[in-house]
């Protein structure tokens, strides 16, 4: 679809969905796809895939909103995959085991005469929010879509967040997974499924110790799987991949070697980026050395009021002043017939909240709340993190996964990144190869000294294994200041110096 074919009507709730107990009379959904499954009606925007399969014995109906990628069966369509899942019935063990082997961005609804269950992709990038009204359950892609059928009111959560200094001071502000800005609307957390009969979220992963393998074996296995994920996606879609100077896009580029001549590679120019910036200069040099085209998309244009209005209407809260302006640049130039391949979710592996691979004991939810400066002033966020911490602590003790990695997975990816992809659904569909539970499990099992700063040796080794030529250009070349920070990090004093500096600032304030 070309840019001049997109209309305001086609952008309303683009690539979103709504599940209701009754038919919906809203004019917003008049051109949407509609399925009646079990006790529910599923409405899906024309630009999102909607597939359903009934089991051979007619006891199970499996419905997918979005798409599923199975690297073991790259040629299989959504319907082919759903036919396999239908054989599992409502067995949580079999379903969760299979969900460890697939990627994509999807909502999976499993309906039987007795129960309805809802799962989503590993990092929850296809968001699912739900509410109950007059004893009936509604599920949607984001809270404001419920306003089409219900009277959703703005309460204390909404006002405390929208007027907070945290929201004002953070351009990419976000709230934890599990909650929303509306008291009566909840959010499905990654690694959980929703049981409609009790309206409870039930954790199904992690359910075992992380696998430990020899480093060389793990590198080969992870690299092969990442390459298979790219090949499988290329079977299904025409792909476009953004490229920066960072590790995430570099490792995705290395995994695309066998299909690179079919991929549209590009870099977004936004905020204060200019042709001399590493995030523009390095991708251009690298792709030229590989014999590939580099496309620059200018996202510094002023969006017209009609685009602003529809963008802000589609999601609440919307980050129009930043993400929205960037989205307009893509709306104007991004090739609409291609699915964007993003490197996100791999940060789960890179010790994001303990950059140099070590951290002290986490013994209180306050330590988690403090990871996002300003959260401690917002009551419903503090309550949500405290509840998550109590449950997650037990899982961490049983499985050995680091609580900071789990927090990054379920909250930073399941909310901040998922919100970004939700907002950008107005201009592109997104595929995230690292959104694969088995791949993340495998890489999390590798020692932290290989997957942390400053060298990120695991990524270096994987890139060289898949396509060594991609390492001919530097990855995030450090400034003098960053080199000093890296030295302090390696000898274990960076966090102490940082804490002392912040304490001094507070004391002098």
Image (cartoon, rainbow, N blue to C red):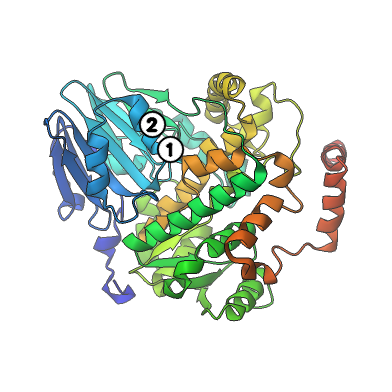
Q: Residues within 10 Å of mark 2 (few under 14, many from 20)?
A: some
Residue corresponding to mark 2: 96
Residue 381, given in percent of the width and then of the height, sits at 55, 30
The answer to which of 9 and 137 lies nearer the viewer is 137
- 341 shown above or below 218: below
Q: Residue at x 28, y 69 (%)?
A: 6
Question: How far is mark 2 from mark 1, CA to CA?
Answer: 7 Å
Residue 167, given in percent of the width and then of the height, sits at 57, 44
Q: What is the quadrant of residue 231 in the picture?
A: bottom left
Residue 51, given in percent of the width and then of the height, sits at 21, 47
Q: Using the rendered image of the protein, determine whether residue 146 is visible from the camera's viewpoint.
A: yes
Report the side of 57 relative to 141 (left or right).
left
Q: Residue at x 52, y 78 (%)?
A: 292
Secondary element at image label 1:
loop
Q: Using the rendered image of the protein, determine whether residue 429 is visible from the camera's viewpoint.
A: no
Q: Residue at x 39, y 37 (%)?
A: 99
Residue corresponding to mark 1: 100
Q: Residues within 10 Å of mark 1 (few under 14, many from 20)?
A: some
Residue 130, given in percent of the width and then of the height, sits at 33, 32
């Amino acid at each position: 679809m070309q840019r001049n074919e997109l209309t305001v009507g086609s952008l309303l709730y683009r690539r979103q969905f709504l599940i209701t107990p009754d038919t919906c009379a809203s004019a917003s959904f008049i051109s949407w796809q509609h399925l009646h499954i079990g006790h529910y009606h599923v409405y899906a925007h024309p630009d999102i895939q909607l597939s359903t399969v009934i089991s051979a014995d007619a006891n199970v109906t499996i419905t997918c909103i979005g798409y599923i990628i199975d690297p073991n069966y790259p040629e299989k369509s959504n319907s082919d995959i759903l036919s396999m899942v239908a054989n599992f019935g409502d067995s949580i063990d079999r379903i969760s085991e299979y969900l460890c082997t697939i990627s994509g961005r999807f909502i999976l609804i499993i309906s039987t005469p007795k129960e309805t269950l809802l799962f989503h992709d590993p990092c929850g990038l296809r968001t699912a929010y739900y509410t109950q009204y007059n004893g009936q359950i509604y599920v949607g892609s984001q809270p404001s879509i419920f306003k089409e059928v219900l009277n959703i009111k703005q309460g204390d959560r909404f006002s405390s967040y929208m007027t907070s200094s945290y929201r004002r001071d953070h351009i990419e502000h976000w709230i934890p997974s599990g909650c929303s800005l509306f008291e009566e609307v909840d959010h499905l957390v990654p690694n959980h499924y929703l049981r409609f009969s009790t309206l409870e979220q039930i954790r199904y992963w992690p359910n075992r110790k992380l696998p430990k393998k020899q480093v060389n074996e793990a590198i080969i296995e992870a690299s092969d799987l990442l390459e298979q994920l790219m090949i499988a996606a290329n079977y299904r879609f025409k792909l476009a991949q953004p490229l920066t100077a960072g590790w995430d896009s570099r490792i995705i580029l290395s995994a695309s070697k066998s299909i690179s001549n079919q991929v549209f590679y590009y870099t977004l120019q936004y905020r204060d980026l200019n042709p001399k910036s590493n995030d523009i200069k390095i991708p251009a040099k690298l792709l030229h050395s590989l014999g590939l085209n580099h496309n620059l998309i200018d996202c510094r244009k002023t969006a017209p009021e009609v685009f602003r209005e529809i963008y802000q209407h589609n999601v609440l809260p919307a980050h129009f002043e930043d993400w929205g302006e960037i989205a307009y640049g893509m709306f104007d130039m991004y090739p609409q017939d291609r699915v964007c391949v993003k490197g996100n979710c791999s940060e789960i592996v890179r010790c994001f909240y303990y950059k140099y691979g070590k951290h002290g004991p986490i013994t209180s939810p306050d330590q988690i709340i403090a990871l996002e400066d300003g959260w401690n002033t917002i009551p419903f966020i503090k309550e949500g993190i405290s509840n998550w911490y109590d449950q997650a602590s037990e899982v961490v003790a049983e499985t050995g996964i680091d609580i900071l990695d789990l927090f990054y997975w379920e909250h930073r990816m399941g909310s901040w990144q998922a919100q970004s992809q939700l907002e950008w659904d107005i201009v592109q569909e997104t595929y995230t190869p690292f959104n694969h539970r088995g791949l993340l499990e495998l890489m999390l099992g590798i020692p932290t000294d290989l997957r942390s700063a400053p060298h990120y040796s695991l990524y270096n080794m994987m890139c060289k294994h898949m396509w060594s030529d991609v390492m001919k250009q530097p990855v995030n070349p450090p400034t003098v200041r960053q080199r000093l920070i890296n030295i302090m990090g390696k000898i274990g004093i960076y966090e102490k110096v940082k804490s002392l500096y912040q304490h001094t600032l507070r004391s002098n304030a």
